[in-house]
Amino acid sequence: MVYTAEDGRAKLFFRVFIVGFVALAIVVGKNQAETIKCILVEQGIIDDKRKIKRYEDKVEIPVKAIPDIAAEFEVVEQKNYLQRKPFIPFEEIKKLLKDIPERDLKHLPRKWEKFGDVLVVKMPGISEKERVARAYAQVLDCKTVLEDVRGISGITRTPHFTFIYGDNAETVHIENGIKYRFDVSRIMFSSGNVDERIRMASVAQRHEVVVDMFAGIGYFTLPLAVHGGAKVFACEINPVAYTYLSHNCMLNQVTDRVVPLLGDCRKVAPQGVASRIVMGYFDSLSFLSHALGVLKNEGVIHLHQKCREEDFPERILKKAARTAREQGKKVELLFNKKIKSYAPRIIHGVLDIMIS
Ligand SMILES: C[S@@+](CC[C@H](N)C(=O)[O-])C[C@H]1O[C@@H](n2cnc3c(N)ncnc32)[C@H](O)[C@@H]1O
């Protein structure tokens, strides 16, 4: 049976079916599989107790429920599937560290971030950090472990991480079929923005001209160019991030579609060219008046903003509308989403606004 997420009746039918413990899977085209898999992992819908099956041009992904995704897929009952051995990393780590001091054992981090083969953890309360880090590296198959001591700060969003185990933090992190090479100790990568990176893969038309005003190592530029086929002018002020951005365009074979530009986007972004602008910065509002000059007549701006929870999206939209009005332009809200929370009642959100 083939149906899309809009087909409510089919969904209901299968939800009832699931209650009967049927091993369900969705079948998708091979070239869409990686993107869909990322979304399903994010939504917690993928059933990781069963193995994914790959055929010549299709992929069968085991699921716990019918996903709500804007893609065409077939729902099947999985027969003769292979079971995955449950692997609980934290339990394995604890086994390796059973003789460390009781106090350390109590403070072992239960959360971490893994980028390629580099791990980032917080380690408050741990005295034998090197030994603990080695155990995490062994179980999680990492060459380096960094301690997150003071988070990320400054306009270049620089991480304050120290080396606890290993001495090389350059890695290639693969997400949604895109390769991001970067040095985890020098450049940030926000795990919380994964949905946005996936969304950017499908917002643009092929050959559409996009300006990414805060490109970093290509967080949004690469999905736009690799999956969307867009032509992207990518501005980045930090020379280290710019070098990785240029390298990542080669790594992902999009040098014909991406123009990396080193410098302040207010100076280096081309004027009057874009029908879409990405502003992936925590205070994009203060750059909006410059962004308006980058648009070719009208277009969509993906405006990221850190703000108080109660100000999102109305107050942010009002401020954007005021800036646009000063240049004789109108704003219409197309989409908004809270991406993550920074601190109590402080969030990072994105607004898609149409400027005309
Ligand atoms: C790190 S990104 C934000 C995170 C990203 N959206 C993600 O998905 O992880 C912001 C980038 O904008 C760059 N940046 C800051 N101010 C800038 C400016 N005025 N012009 C160009 N780039 C700038 C920073 O150096 C940084 O690399």
Image (tube, rainbow, N blue to C red):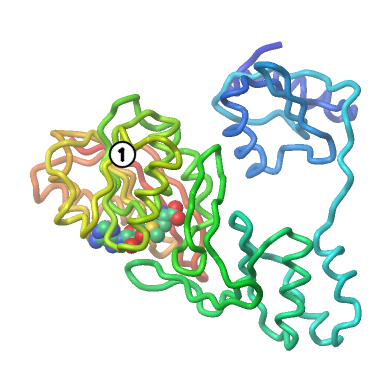
Q: Is residue 53 left or right of residue 355?
A: right
| Image coords of residue 233 (percent x, y) | 26, 42
Q: Residue at x 62, y 22 (%)?
A: 30
Of 302 and 18, which appears nearest the observer?
302
Q: Tell me the SS state at disc 1.
A: strand
The quadrant holding residue 276 is top left
Quadrant hosting ligand 1: bottom left
Q: Residue at x 62, y 28 (%)?
A: 33
Please give the residue where the numbered disc 1 appears in the rendered image.
258
Residue type indicated by callout 1: Val
| Image coords of residue 190 (percent x, y) | 50, 58
Mark 1 and ligand 1: say if the CB distance to the nearest ligand atom is below 8 Å: no
Q: Is residue 356 left or right of residue 8?
A: left
The correct choice, above or below, for 83 with respect to 138 in the image is above
| Image coords of residue 347 (percent x, y) | 46, 61
For the question of whether residue 311 can be seen, the reply is no
| Quadrant placement of the C terminus | top left
The quadrant holding residue 174 is top right
